[in-house]
Amino acid sequence: HLSLHKMKRERVFELAKGFRGKAKNCFRVANAQVEEALENQYADRKVLKRDMRAMWIQRINAGTREHGLKYGDFIHGQKLANVALDRKILADLAVTEPFSFKKVVDIARDALMVSKQAQAAALAQA
C-alpha cells in the first residue's frame, strides 16, 4: 500500500507529464510548476469566458450597425421588448441567419421608438 507522501508525489508527477527539464522528474521543481500551471489554468478559464463575450459583442455590434442601430441601443431595445436571447445566440444569428437577426433588430428598434414616443409625451404633459 502507498503512503500519503508517495501518493502526493505520484499525483504531482502525473500532472507534470509533458513538462520540460527537471519540471517533470524533480519533485520540488515539479511541484512548483504544477501549482503554477493549475493557477494559470483556473485564471485562463475566466479569461476564455471574457474573450468569448467580447467576441459575441463585436459580432452583434457589426450586425446591428448594418441595420442602422448601435449595439447599446439594440440591447436596450431588446430589453424593452422582452426578447430573451443571450449574446451567444444573437452573435450566432448575426453570422449564420442574417434575415432572422434583422427581425430581432427590427423588434428592438420598434420597442425603442415606442419608448422614446412615451418619453416625449410625458415631457409634453409636464
Image (cartoon, rainbow, N blue to C red):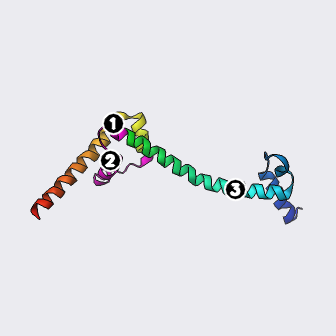
Residue 123 in picture, x, y percent from top left? 14, 61
Kindly state the secondary structure of the residue where label 3 is placed. helix
Q: Secondary structure at mark 1?
A: helix
Is 53 placed left or right of 2 in the picture?
left
Q: Main secondary structure of the magenta part?
A: helix
Residue ID for mark 2: 74
Q: Which residue is mark 3?
A: 38
- The magenta region covers 63-88
Residue at the farthest left position: 125
Can the viewer see residue 59 in this picture? yes
Residue neighbourhood size for the residue with mark 3, other residues' Cα within 10 Å, grouped as few (<14), some (14–19), many (≥20): few
Closer to the chain start, of discs 3 and 2, is: 3
Q: Residues within 10 Å of mark 2 (few under 14, many from 20)?
A: many
Q: Is residue 11 visible?
A: no
**Which disc, if any, is residue 66?**
1
Q: As shown in the figure, which amino acid type bears the numbered disc 1?
A: Glu
Q: CA distance from mark 3 to mark 1?
A: 43 Å
Question: From what the image shows, is residue 34 above or below residue 64?
Answer: below
Which residue shows up at 11% across the image and 65% down it? Answer: 126
Q: Residue 96: where, in percent of width, then height?
A: 42, 34
Q: CA distance from mark 1 to mark 2?
A: 12 Å
105 left or right of 56 in image:
left
SS type, badge 2 = helix
